[in-house]
C-alpha cells in the first residue's frame, strides 16, 4: 500500500473511526490513540500483503484493539475498593487497636490494684475511680486526711511502676 493511499484513507476515515471509538470508550484521547494504532497496523500489514477492503480492515483492527484494551484494563484493575473505604477500614482498625490497648491497660491496672493492701486499694478506688476528694474519702473511711494522701501516693507510685513495666 502506498503512502498516498494511506494518506487518502486517513483523511477519509480517521474522524469517523475516532467518533466510533469515542462512543464506545467515552475517552476521546484513547479513541485517537486507537485510530493511530489502527492506521499503523494497516500500514505495516499493507507493506507485506494486499488488503482488499481497507475500510473494513481499519474498523476491524480498531475494534480488536479496543477489545484488547478493555481486557487489559480489566486485568489491571486493582482499585475495586476506593481509597476512602480503605481509610475508613484503617480508621476502624486503629480504633480497634486503641480499644485493645486500653483493655490491656485496664487489665494491668486491675492486677496492680489487686496487689495493693486493702485499705490502700479502697482509697485509690474512692478517689480515682469514684471521684471523691481526699476529705470525702477521709470522712467515709474515718481516717485522717494525711493518711488518705499517704496511701494514695503509695498506690499511685506502685500502679505507675507496674504499668510502665508490666512483666515485673
Image (cartoon, grey):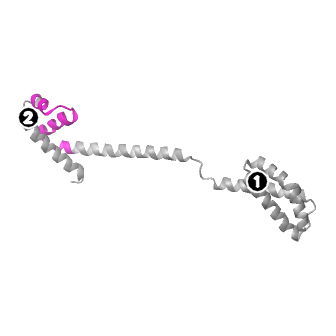
Numbered label attached to residue 145: 2
Per the image, label 2 sits on a secondary structure element best described as helix
Measured in 3D between alpha carbons, the distance from the residue under mark 2 to the one under mark 1, in whole angstroms, is: 85 Å
Magenta stretch secondary structure, dominant: helix
Q: Residue at the location (21% across, 32% down)?
A: 131
Q: Quadrant of the N terminus?
A: bottom right
Residue at 23% x, 42% y: name it: 110
| Residue 118 on the magenta segment | yes
Q: Which residue is mark 1?
A: 31
Q: Which residues are magenta?
A: 112-139
Q: Secondary structure at mark 1?
A: helix
Farthest residue, direction right = 52
Q: Does the image show residue 32?
A: yes
Q: Are marks 2 and 1 in contact (CB under 8 Å)?
A: no
- Identify the image quadrant of the C terminus: bottom left
Q: Is residue 79 left or right of residue 96?
A: right
Residue 129 located within the stretch drawn in magenta: yes
The relative height of residue 141 versus residue 110 in the rendered view (above or below) is above
Amino acid at each position: 500500500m502506498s503512502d498516498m493511499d494511506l494518506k487518502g484513507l486517513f483523511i477519509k476515515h480517521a474522524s469517523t473511526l475516532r467518533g466510533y471509538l469515542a462512543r464506545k470508550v467515552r475517552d476521546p484521547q484513547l479513541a485517537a490513540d486507537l485510530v493511530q494504532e489502527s492506521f499503523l497496523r494497516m500500514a505495516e500489514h499493507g507493506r507485506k500483503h494486499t488488503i482488499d477492503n481497507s475500510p473494513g480492515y481499519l474498523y476491524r483492527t480498531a475494534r480488536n484493539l479496543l477489545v484488547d484494551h478493555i481486557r487489559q484494563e480489566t486485568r489491571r484493575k486493582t482499585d475495586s475498593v476506593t481509597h476512602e473505604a480503605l481509610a475508613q477500614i484503617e480508621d476502624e482498625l486503629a480504633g480497634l487497636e486503641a480499644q485493645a490497648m486500653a483493655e490491656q491497660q485496664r487489665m494491668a491496672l486491675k492486677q496492680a490494684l489487686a496487689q495493693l493492701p486493702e485499705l490502700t486499694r479502697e482509697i485509690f478506688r474512692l478517689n480515682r475511680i469514684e471521684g471523691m476528694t481526699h476529705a470525702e474519702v477521709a470522712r467515709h473511711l474515718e481516717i485522717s486526711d494525711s493518711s488518705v494522701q499517704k496511701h494514695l501516693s503509695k498506690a499511685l507510685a506502685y500502679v505507675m511502676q507496674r504499668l510502665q513495666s508490666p512483666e515485673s
